[in-house]
Amino acid sequence: MDGNAKRLLTAQEVAAHNSRESCWIVVHGNVYDVTEFLDEHPGGSKIILKYAGKDATQEYDPIHPPDAITTNLKPDKHLGPIDPSTVQDSASDGLLSEDEQARLARIAARPRLSEILSLHDFEAVARQVMPEKAWAYYSSAADDEITQRENHAAFHRIWFRPRILRDVTKVDWSTTILGHKSSMPVYITATALGKLGHPDGELNLTRAATRHGIIQMIPTLASCSFDEIVDAAEPGQVLFFQLYVNKDRSITKRIVQHSEARGIKGLFITVDAPQLGRREKDMRQKFEADDPSEVSKAKQGNVDRTQGAARAISSFIDPSLNWADLEWFRSITKMPLILKGVQCWEDALEAYDRGLNGVVLSNHGGRQLDFARSGIEVLVEVAAKLKKKRGVTLPIDTFQVFVDGGVRRATDVIKAVALGATAVGIGRPFLYAYSSYGAEGIDKALQILHDEFEMNMRLLGSRTIREIVPDMVDTSNIHMHTVPVPIDNLYEGNYEKLVGAHLREV
Ligand code: 173
C-alpha cells in the first residue's frame, strides 16, 4: 500500500476514462490508471481497452495473480478504491465475487515457503490458490486421466538396490545434456500458457534456470514471446525449443531457423499430438477469455473457444507429420533433433536408425492418449531393445533418451537415470511452484530437488551420475499395472477427482 490516503472514486468518474487517451480500470475494487501501461501490457492493449472505464476483475483474474497490477503499476497510478454505493449492479459488474474473496483469503493463508517440503506441497497450494481456469488447464489430462496418474504410479513399481560402505562424503549429481552442462539430470520441459499461473509466465523459469544451472525447453505455445524468453536468458545460457509443426511449413521453417539463429541448442519436435487430447476439466471451464499470449499468432481460422484453452489454440498443428518429414528438418537446421512423445521401443529404434539425436519417452503429461504407458515403463523396454537389437547400452552421447511425466522426487529422476535416461523433464511441478509463490517458489522447488539428490545419492551409494547404474534398481514389476503399491498420500491428496456433468442452474 502507498502512504497517501486515497479518496473514494465513483463508478461514474471511472466510466469517463474509457479511451486510449485516458484509460482507467477497476480490479478487485480498486481503480487504476493504465493509460501509460497499455502498450507495455504483455497481453496487448486491446484486451485492456475492452474494459476501459469498467471493472476488469473477471477478465483479469484467470490470467494474473492478484498482485500483478499493484506491482506492475507505479503507486501514483493506483487511484484508490471505488465507492461501492455508486456501482449499480456489483454482481454483473464483477466486483469481487464471493468465490474470489474466498480465493484471496486462501492466498493470504498460504503456508510460508519455509514450510514447503516437497514438490507435492506446491501442487497442494496451487490447487487452492490458482484461479480456477488456470488450475483446470494446468492440471487436466486426457479422458479418465488414467495415464496421468499412471505416470506417477509407475515410479512406485521400481525399487532400489542401494550399495553400502562406499565413501559418499562427496556426491555430485551434475551431468551433461546434449553436451551441455546441467547441475542435475533434470530439465524444465515445455508447457503452454505460462501466464495463466503468473504474469511473468515462462520468464520465471528462464531466470530460475540461470540461477540453478539447468536447461529450459521453450514451448511453441508460451505465453511470453520466444524472443522475450531468449532475451531474458543470460549470455551463454543453454535453451532448448519444443516445436509444434504447423500445417504451413513455411511458418515452421521460419520458427526453426529463427530459433537456431538465436542459439537454441536442441529442437524437440512434438510427435504425440496430431490432435489435442480431450481434457475434460479444462473443457468444462469454457475458455472464453482472450488468451494472454503470443499463442494467438499461431491460431488459424475460426477458433472454437468452447472446448477449453488448449483446444481453442491448437488447430494449426499438422496431423500429417510423418517420418519422411524428418529429412526436411535435417535440411533446414543443424540443431540436434529429438522426437518428443515416443511411446514404444519400435519408434525409439526407428528414430535411432534414422540418425535422430534422441527421443523423449513421454505421453505429454497424460494429456494425449489415455492408457498410453508411462515414459519410465517405456524406458525399460527401449534400453533393453537398444541393447539386444543394436548392441547399444544406454546412456550414449549420440542418441540420448529422456523421460518425462509424473516426476515429483529426485528418487524418480534417479530411477530414470539408472535405467539409461540422460535426463528427465519436469513440467507441472514448476508451474505450480511459480503459480503459488512466484520466482521464490521455483527457486525453492529447485533447491528441494538439489537437497533430495544429495541425500538420495548418498543413500544409494552413488557418487556421480555415472555410478547410478541399472543394478541399483529392481524393475521386475514395471510392466505389471495391477501390482498394489502403498497409497501415495501426498500425491493422491492433491489429485483432483474428475466429476461428471452438472445440472444447469434453473
Ligand atoms: O498439452 C497441452 O496443453 C499442449 O501442448 C497445448 C497444445 C496446443 C495448444 C495449447 C496447449
Image (cartoon, rainbow, N blue to C red):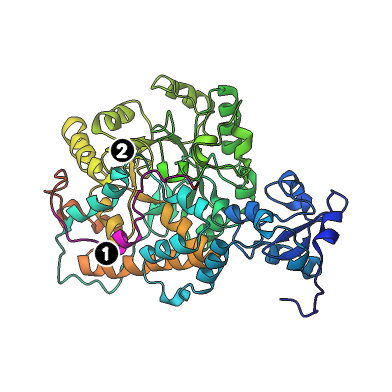
Question: Dot 1 surroundings within 10 Å: few (below 14), some, or many (20 or more)?
Answer: few
Front in this rendered view, residue 147 or 202: 147
Q: Was residue 196 drawn as part of the magenta stretch in this picture?
A: no
Number of labels in the image equals 2
Label 2: which residue? 370
User: Could one spot residue 235 in this view of the protein?
Assistant: no
For label 2, being within 8 Å of ligand 1 is answered no
**Mark 2, residues whose alpha carbon is within 10 Å: few (<14), some, or many (≥20)?**
some
Q: Is mark 1 within 8 Å of ligand 1?
A: no
Q: Give the Cα distance between marks 1 and 2.
A: 23 Å
User: Percent from the top left, x then y, of residue 28?
Assistant: 67, 64
Question: Residue 153, position in %: x, y?
Answer: 24, 52
Q: Dividing the picture into quarters, in which one does residue 400 lie?
A: top left
Which of the numbered marks, if any, corresponds to residue 132? none
**Residue type beneath disc 1:** Asn
Residue 326 percent location from the top left of the image: 43, 24
Is the stretch drawn in magenta largely helix, strand or loop? loop
User: Left or right: where does residue 91 sit relative to residue 436?
Assistant: right
Secondary element type, mark 2: loop
Kindly identify the amino acid type of the residue bearing the numbered disc 2. Asp
Quarter of the image that includes the N terminus: bottom right
Instruction: State which region is magenta.
Output: 484-504
> Does residue 495 show up magenta in the picture?
yes
Residue 146 occupies quadrant: top left
User: Looking at the image, is 204 positioned above or below residue 4?
Assistant: above
Q: Position of residue 232 (x, y in %)?
A: 62, 54
Residue position for label 1 = 489
Q: Which callout, 1 or 2, points at the residue further toward the start of the chain? A: 2
Residue 504 in sight in this render: yes
User: Residue at image x 55%, y 42%?
Assistant: 287
Labelled pair 1, 2 in contact (Cβ < 8 Å): no
